[in-house]
Amino acid sequence: MTENIKKVKINEEKCIGCGACSIYAPEAFDLDPEKGKAVVKEGAENTDEEKIKEAAQYCPVQAIEIEQ
């Protein structure tokens, strides 16, 4: 479980909508087709912490913000 993660956010100004986050943590991230940006799914903080950290690591523009 992700007891250490309190909140996960996408910085929309940085996000380029590449979808890497939804590949590494599909339970936590999706793409908004209207905005062309990533969004955090409801309940994302309950996703495996390692998957969220991996998604953040592989985001090419570092748009994923994790609050511990």
Image: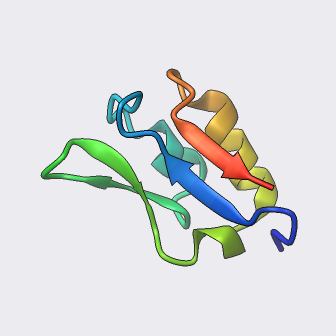
Q: Residue at x 52, y 44 (%)?
A: 21
Of residue 7 and residue 52, the one placed in the foreground of this image is: 7
Q: Position of residue 11 (x, y in %)?
A: 45, 39
The quarter of the displayed image where residue 62 is located: top right
The quarter of the displayed image where residue 46 is located: bottom right
Q: Is residue 4 left or right of residue 57?
A: right
Query: How did the renderer colour the structure?
Result: rainbow
Q: Residue at x 65, y 62 (%)?
A: 7
Q: Position of residue 68 (x, y in %)?
A: 81, 56
Q: Residue at x 55, y 63 (%)?
A: 28
Above or below, comparing residue 55 to residue 59 in the picture: below
Above or below, comparing residue 14 to residue 47 in the picture: above
Q: How many marks?
A: 0
Q: Among all residues in the image, which is located at the extreme left?
A: 34
**Which quarter of the rendering shows the N terminus?**
bottom right
Q: Is residue 14 left or right of residue 7?
A: left
Q: Is residue 37 left or right of residue 65?
A: left
Q: Position of residue 39 (x, y in %)?
A: 39, 55
Q: Is residue 53 left or right of residue 14?
A: right
Above or below, comparing residue 3 to residue 23 in the picture: below
